[in-house]
Amino acid sequence: MLIGERWRAGSRPPRSLEKYPEFVESCSAQEHVLSPTVGDVSKLWWTLTWLEGRPVAELEQGPRVALRADGSVHLSGAEEPVGAGVGVADGDSPEHDVFDEDEDDDDLFPEPAPRA
C-alpha cells in the first residue's frame, strides 16, 4: 500500500487520478448522495491510498471507492450513516461499525486463475 494524499470533497481531485475518470466520477457521485444529509460536503475530506497500483479513496466516516484489478469501480461503506465513525468507538454501536466482520476486501484481492 502506498499513501497518497487528501483532498476536500467538492474540490478538484489529485492529478494522479486524471487517468481514472470513472473512479473520479464515482467519488463525485458519492458527494452528491451525501450532500442532503451532510449539508456542506466541503467539510469532509477524501483520503487517497494506492493498493497494488490502484487507487482507493475513503471519504471521512463514509464510503470507500476502490478500483478493482479488472478496471471496475467498487463502492463500499455507502450504506453506513455519515458520522458513524471508523470502527466501534465511544457511543457507536456495532451495527455502525464500518469495518465489521461482514466487510471484507475479497473483491479487492480476487482469487488467482487456476494454472493450466
Image (cartoon, grey):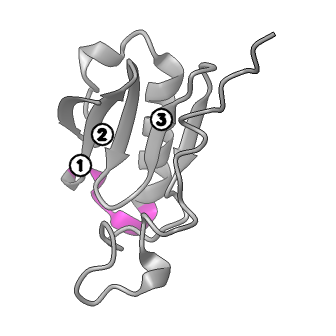
Coordinates of residue 14 in the picture (x, y in percent) = 24, 22
Q: Residue at x 42, y 9 (%)?
A: 19
Three-letter residue code for mark 1? Ser
Taking 29 as reference, is 1 above or below it? above
Most prominent secondary structure in the magenta stretch? helix
Q: Residue at x 26, y 80 (%)?
A: 89
Please rate how many residues cluster around mark 3, counting C-alpha atoms within 10 Å: few if below 14, some from 14 to 19, many from 20: many
First in sequence: mark 2 vs mark 1: 2
Please rate how many residues cluster around mark 1, counting C-alpha atoms within 10 Å: few if below 14, some from 14 to 19, many from 20: some
Three-letter residue code for mark 3? Ala
> Is residue 27 within the magenta segment?
no
> How many numbered circles are shown?
3
Quadrant housing residue 73: top right
- Residue topped by disc 3: 66
What secondary structure is found at the residue carrying circle 3? strand
Q: Nearer the viewer, residue 109 or 11?
A: 109
Q: Nearer the viewer, residue 13 or 109?
A: 109
Q: CA distance from mark 2 to mark 3?
A: 18 Å
Q: Residue at x 66, y 24 (%)?
A: 112
What secondary structure is found at the residue carrying circle 2? loop
Q: Residue at x 23, y 49 (%)?
A: 42
Taking 53 as reference, is 67 above or below it? below
Looking at the rendering, the stretch of residues picked out in magenta corresponds to 36-42
Quadrant housing residue 82: bottom left
